[in-house]
Amino acid sequence: MADRSKQLIIAIDGPAGSGKSTVSKMVAKKLDLLYLDTGAMYRALTLKAMQAKLDLENEKQLIDMVKDTKIQIETRPRAKSIKVFLDGKDVTHKIRTPKLTDNIKYIAKVPGVRKCMVKMQRQIAAKKGAVLEGRDTTTVVFPDANYKFYLDANIAERSKRRFKDLSAICVDISIEDVKEDVRVRDESDKTRKVAPLKKAEDAICIDTTNMSIDEVVDRILSEVKS
Ligand code: C5P
């Protein structure tokens, strides 16, 4: 049993469409912890850089921008959704477009940007304990988390889930294009030099391909309670 004298931290990593967001939200609600979608933070930064028409290859510009950025994530448990605020403005929907998703890689690979994000994520999570999800929450943000999970699923299933999510917010895209986007994003997240997506050695791996959301949530909760 993990040390419970500190705030409880549950970190969940995995590729796009592995079920992290839905599952993390539910686990956080059950355990009365904060839910932190770290991907939404990288998305918000990307939006700001695009709106300011920054050169996405210019690391200094990006780092200066991050230092002057406020991101707030509001969890609305009843609505099972989050709201994302960038410098006080609600950008919840704007950060989900395919064009923006395509540009995140430029921001996510900059060490100085990640350093600021990790600091912010640790501060937010330390307040009352949290379920964090993303690509490096088990390896960089909280390598000493009480519980660490790596969620995965085959690419066909992950693409199907992403397609459903995007259709629900009226993004017009074909399943083939979603699959290609997921494949390209996997590649870039797993091969970047800084904080690549990988399974932490001591993370519990769950293949969610043939599991329902409730089954995955129960599996995680059974580990946390045992
Ligand atoms: O989780 P989501 O798909 O919204 O994340 C979008 C992108 O943000 C990822 O593909 C990845 O490039 C980046 N990201 C990251 N580190 C995190 C979370 C997300 O680099 N902890």
Image: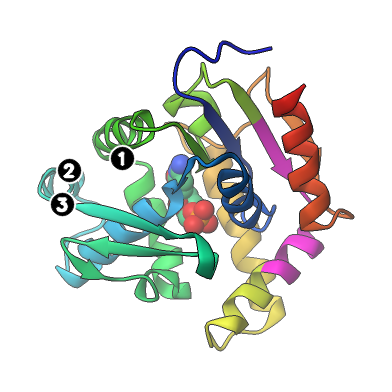
Q: CA distance from mark 2 to mark 3?
A: 10 Å
The residue where tag 1 is placed is 110
Amino acid type, callout 3: Thr
Q: Residue at x 42, y 74 (%)?
A: 99
Q: Is residue 151 magenta?
A: yes
Left or right: 117 as drawn, with respect to 167: left
* Mark 1 or 3, nearer chain start: 3
Provide residue 182's location: percent of width, then percent of height.
Answer: 63, 61
* Mark 2 or 3, nearer chain start: 2
Residue 219 occupies quadrant? top right
Depth check: give the residue in front, 127 or 147: 127
- Of badges 2 and 3, nearer the viewer stands 3
Provide residue 46's location: percent of width, then percent of height.
Answer: 30, 60
Q: Residue at x 19, y 60 (%)?
A: 55
| Position above or below: 21 against 120 | below
Location of the C terminus by quadrant is top right
The residue where tag 3 is placed is 69
Location of the N terminus by quadrant is top right
The residue where tag 2 is placed is 63
Q: CA distance from mark 1 to mark 3?
A: 16 Å
Asked if disc 2 and disc 1 are in contact, CB closer than 8 Å, the reply is: yes
Q: Residue at x 68, y 18 (%)?
A: 202
Left or right: 138 as drawn, with respect to 92: right
The stretch of residues the image draws in magenta is 149-161
Provide residue 105's location: percent of width, then percent of height.
Answer: 41, 52
**Circle 1 — which element?**
loop
Depth check: give the residue in front, 99 or 84: 84
Amino acid type, callout 2: Ile
